[in-house]
Image (cartoon, rainbow, N blue to C red):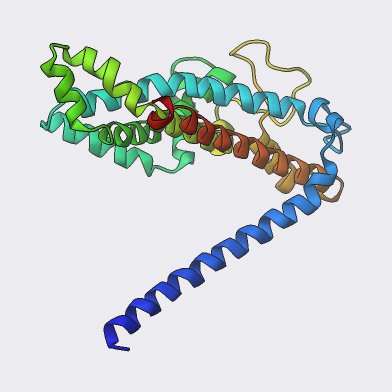
Amino acid sequence: MNLRTFWMRLGLASLVVCTLIVVAFMAALLFDLSWQGIPVLSWEFLTEFPQKGMTEGGIWPAIFGTTAVTLLATLLAAPLGVACAVWLEEYAGEGWLTQLTRAAVRNLAGVPSIVYGLFGLALFVQGMRMGASVLASACTLALLTLPAVIATTQEALRQVPRSLREGALALGATRWETTYSIVLPAALPGILTGVILALSRAAGETAPILFTGVAFYTRYLPASLFDEFMALPYHLYILATQHHEPEAVRPIAYGTAITLLLLVFLLNLGAFILRAQYHPKKRL
């Protein structure tokens, strides 16, 4: 065995070991959450309101609030993100404005979520006078997920062969007709996957909604977009770190954690199903 082969095998072995370590930690975490959380799950736990200082009852308001605010955030972020990506890839060219916009998107993707929360507090809650509400939290989460939607949509558009665009233009189609009828349908699987993955990330965020509308406990579900709401991530945070009876609420905390993981898993599963459903080869 020569020296080059030795280093190649050593590098491959290091990658395998690192991968196994990560998988082992993930398996241990999932096992602990499943062991403690699955016995708590029941129909009553998922559909009832919390009772007796969160020590009894269920987490239905938190499930409803998380679902509502993330869906609204997606409705706000998806059209803007897709439109921005289409402009950058199909119309903008290579000017200074394009380079500046791409740099801004890359930088915004790395901004900590707590910064988005403070920005949402200043802009939506106080500046636009939305108050602490579902709408303010959804707008903040939309800003948080917008860079991810733009980046994944750009990548999906780049995967569409240039020959499809050139063929449509050669047949007399306008640039917009080419984009709308040829490019976007071909890129749809990647766009949907990116949007849903961004949605699953928004469902697990705590910091952006901490300052903009989430409440520790409400007796009613939000009746309008300007009401406060409960959410699974914040509910779990309070139960695990701030509750005055940590031992009493620990089973509920595990149940909340496993519910949040299941929700995120279902969203990711939906992304894979949609990607398979709209795959070009399957449509053919």
Along the viewing direction, whichever of 89 and 120 lies nearer the viewer: 89
Residue 118 appearing in the image: no
Where residue 89 appears, as percent x and y from the top left, is: 22, 29
Where residue 157 appears, as percent x and y from the top left, is: 28, 31
For the image shown, how many numbered marks are present on the structure?
0
Where residue 271 appears, as percent x and y from the top left, is: 51, 33
Residue 104 left/right relative to 258: left
Q: The N terminus is located in which quarter?
A: bottom left
Q: Which residue is found at the position 39% from the left and 33% from the top?
A: 190
Q: Which residue is the extreme one toward the front?
A: 284
Along the viewing direction, whichever of 239 and 77 lies nearer the viewer: 77
Q: Which residue is found at the position 13% from the left and 28% from the top?
A: 93
Residue 75 left/right relative to 93: right
Residue 18 appearing in the image: yes
Residue 16 left/right relative to 68: left
Q: Is residue 33 above or below residue 235?
A: below
Q: Which residue is found at the position 19% from the left and 24% from the top?
A: 165
Residue 236: which quarter of the image? top right
Where residue 90 appears, as percent x and y from the top left, is: 20, 25
Residue 17 left/right relative to 147: right
Q: Which residue is found at the position 76% from the left and 26% from the top?
A: 60
Q: Is residue 134 above or below residue 217?
A: above
Residue 234: which quarter of the image? top right
Q: Is residue 257 above or below residue 49?
A: below
Q: The C terminus is located in which quarter?
A: top left
